[in-house]
Structure formats: C-alpha cells, structure tokens
Image (cartoon, rainbow, N blue to C red):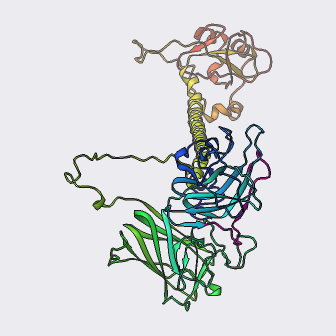
Amino acid sequence: MHLFLLLILPVPAVIGQIDPEHCRYALGMEDGRIKDEDITASSQWYDTTGPQYARLHCDNADGAWCPKGPLEPSDSQYLQIDLKKLTFLTLIGTQGRYAGNLGKEFAQEYRLNYSRDGQLWKSWKNRQGQGVLFGNKNTYAVSSNDLKPPIIARFVRVIPVTKLSSTVCMRLELYGCPWDDGLISYSAPVASLNDSTYDGVLDRRKLSGGLGQLTDGMTGLDDYLMTRQFNVWPGYDYLGWKNDTPGTQEYVEMEFVFDGPRNFTSMKVHSNNMFSRGVKIFSSVSCWFKLRLNSPWEAEPVVFKTVLDDRNPSARYVTVPLNRHAAKYVRCRFHFADVWMMFSEISFLSEDTVLASEIPEIGTSAPDEDISTTITTKTAVPSSSDTSEEGNMPILIGCLVTIILLLVVIIFLILWCQCVCKVLEKAPRRILDEEVTVRLSSCSDTIILQTPPVPPRSRHPPAGTTHADPHYERIFLLDPQYQNPVALRNKLPELPQSAEASACGGGYAGEHFYLLTSVCSPDWTDSADSLKSKSPPNQLVFPDKLYRCVSNRAAGTCRQ
C-alpha cells in the first residue's frame, strides 16, 4: 500500500515555482507561433532581410535579419519580439545568415534589453554584472546562451554588438515558459543580504519597481552560507534582514504588484530556519489587498501565524492562505521570530479575475458597439509543472496497470484453490454414490473395484420391497477398521482353502479399478456355492452401496 501511494502521489519540487533547468521550451520563432507582425526592428537593409526573416534555421528570402548599413560600435540597432504575455526566459540561441552558403554575416556579440509593459526597458546582466553575450563564429552553427539570472518579460530586444564597423545579420530563437504568477514587481527594504539581481530602483534604502532573486526559481540551501551558484559570495541565494536593519520595526514590509486583478488563493515563501545561527522563519504575517493604485487598502488584513520549529534546521516553504481575495496590489508584513529572517523565493497561487466595474451594464454601451465575448486559449508552451506531470503520466499509468494485473492474478489463484479444495472434499463420497463392480483377485486379501458408467438416477426410490442380504453389510471408506483392518483380521477364524479359493478366484478385466483390502467374516465359511448364489460367479455389483467381503488370509491362489 505504501509503495502504491509513493507511485501515485506527486513528489514535491525542490526548486522554486519554476525550475529554470526544465523551463527551456522554444517559444515560436522557428515554428512560426510568433507572428511576423510581432517581430519588429529598428531598421533593415532590404525588404528581403526584414525582421520577419530572423527565425532560427530558416533561409527564406535572403536568410536573416540584417540592420541597415554597416554596424558601428556606438550603434544600438535592435530586433524586438513581442511574446504577447509575461514569459520566463532561460535561454537564447542565435545563427548568422547562411543563405545556401552565400551568406557571410553573423553577430559575434550581442546584448539583451527587456520590458514587461513596453514602456520601461531594462538591460540584462549576469550574476557577475556582465551584460554582453557571446554570439556566433560562423553563419550556420547555433550558439546558445543560458540566461542566469532568467528574464521575466513580455518584450525582448536583441542588440548586436561589434567592435569594428561591419555588416551583421542574425537569426534566433527564445526559450522559456509562461510566467503564470502575474507578478511584475515587488518592493522591500534593502536587506543586509542584498538582492544582487534586482532590476528595479534603489531609492532611500528601499527596493521598488523590479524583480530579482525572489523570483529567479532558485531556492536557497539549508545552510545559508552555502550556495547553488558559482563564483558568488556566501549567502548569495537569500535576502536576509536583521531585526535592527534600518526600515524595519519588528517586521519587514513588502509590496507586490501584478499585471492585473487576480483572485489569490495562497502565497508561498521559501524561508531559512537555521535557528542555531539566529535564523528562523517568520512568526506571523499580515496581508492587505487593493484593486487600484489610488484605492485604500482593505481595513481587515489576512493574518497567519506560523508554528516555529526549533528541532529541524531545514529551509522550507511556508504556505500562507489568502482566502481568495481579489486584488492587483498586495502588502504583507512579515514579523521576526529571531534575530534574522531570510527569504529565497516568493510565489503566488492565483487566477485572473475581472472587475465588476469593467463590465458594461446593459443599455449603457454605444449603439454602434458590439459586445462580444472572447475566449482565449493558451497555445503557448506549457509551464514546467504541467510538462513534468505529462512526463510522469505514462509512468503512473504503467504502475497502475501492473498493480491491477497482479490483483487479478491473485484473485484468480484464490478462486482456483477454493474450487480444488471443494473437489477434493467431494472425492471420497463419489465412490460411495456410484455403482461399484467388485472382483476378487487372489488370496492376498485384495478386492478390485471397477466403476462402470452410471446412468442417471431417479430422485425417488424404486417401488417395491428392498431385501437386505444378511451376508453383506455397508462399509464407509473413512471407517478406521476399513483403513487399518489388521487388528480385525487377526481375530477371525481361518477358513478352508477350498472355500477361500472359490470365493477369491477368478480373472478380471476392465477400464478403471480400485484396490481395497478385504476383511474376512465368519459368514463366509459356508462354501464357495454360497458366494455364487449371491452374485454372478465373476463379479459382484452393488448399486449405491459398498459391501465388505469377508475372507480368510489363506495362502495360495484363489479360483473362481
């Protein structure tokens, strides 16, 4: 049973709400899911080198996007892609212009800019602060770059970089998965362990307007001094606040902004709990909600108190129920339980909602406007959690089918054993119920029973008077004296050899025989003629009964 539960229950993920190592799906440049109108550029050399031709492994027209004129080191020509929704980007692949081996142009380096709203643009940098990515060395091979940290954006700009004046052409593909959280920024006091990848604004010791390590999909280790990253400082994976940090008053206040109104089910906070070094999860949290920027916060917050753990120092997710509040802005205050409080990931479980005020009332719309309902279907790449479930589905189905087959085999064996036992229980009684033919062999005191085919019997006894023969009596196969008749035989008198021979002699033949040891009785002492008068000379037939022939243990060969 425990094995069955382990097979069917999902295993919890040890990374964040999105695992960057598995969120690596092509977003549609190569296969055309990203439409031509969603690919734009700052310029193009010819119509045949427009932005719509910047698709990986595609050689249409002149085979790539090429910005106008030779590219100078100071230029910022770009190719812009609209992904239509917030997306978690983890990888980018590029090519040059091959064009059937006629092309010579490719980008040796490039930069990335991105935006969540199309207005405010940010420059991507890696964890070491470098913003330039290595490109191609020829026109045909694909050069891939992991984005660490990942990018959460809707709009992406690829900006080729050159050190000398040269012509550059590019083809590319973006990889990632949908950002279903809908979170576009969080703000918090500047931490003692700072947010090194935050892409917002630092103003008066407060982070605002951006995302960073709390949404990069990487959870911290149990020991916060250890890290999953290379070439970074101890404690890198966590944002950590001390209870005397400026801007904190027994709690850390954070605000979260989303891309639209949402119904919130819960919030998950990955927190360190190394209590031996003064680090614990928060003791309680209070959250307020509002739908618009200029609206007041709700008067009654959602309050959740945690159960502190002083035995297990493992880092863990703490799930805070939010009771399906509808909001676009959320403010939470996390209260200290010890000297330090450290977070590595924060995610929200929510779904899109529509404000009642945004739905036009009947009769208020202009007469020339059509009110229609649009159903949007998600045709983009599935999220990592959905893909992992689909990948595990064949394994789960196989395990369930195997278990069902084993149960069917076990049930069949149980039923078969029960049938065999019933047959064995009825076997000794069949001989008693069938017609038995008895042949006397030799003086070795053995009776041979032959069972010929028995016609069906009538349930009612035949009419007339049944006469019992005083020379025979009924015997049961389970009778102890029948099974071991030695003691009884020793007590019986000996008979003349002639009588024994006349009683026991005779040949026999038949299809099926049963061997039974005979037991002698004084009633047999008359003569061989007495036997012949009771039955035919060569066999004794007893319908529905088994009689015991009593003979003497005399030596010699019996004759009919």
Which percent across, then down, holds residue 354? 34, 58
Q: Main secondary structure of the magenta part?
A: loop
- Residue at x 62% of width, y 67% of height: 123
Residue 328 left/right relative to 529? left
Which percent across, then down, holds residue 477? 61, 29
- In front here: 211 or 16? 211
How many numbered marks appear? 0
- In front here: 507 or 383? 383
Which percent across, then down, holds residue 178? 54, 55
- The magenta region covers 123-142
User: Which residue is the extreme one toward the bottom?
Assistant: 244
- In front here: 177 or 508? 177
Asked if the stretch drawn in magenta spans residue 127, the answer is: yes
Looking at the image, residue 453 lies above or below residue 344: above
- Residue at x 59% of width, y 29% of height: 428
Looking at the image, residue 245 lies above or below residue 387: below
Q: Is residue 9 visible?
A: no
Asked if the stretch drawn in magenta spans residue 221, the answer is: no
- In front here: 73 or 173? 73
Which percent across, then down, holds residue 343? 57, 76
Residue 293 figure quarter:
bottom left
User: Which residue is the extreme one toward the front?
Assistant: 69
Looking at the image, residue 328 lies above or below residue 56: below
- The quarter in which the C terminus is drawn is top right
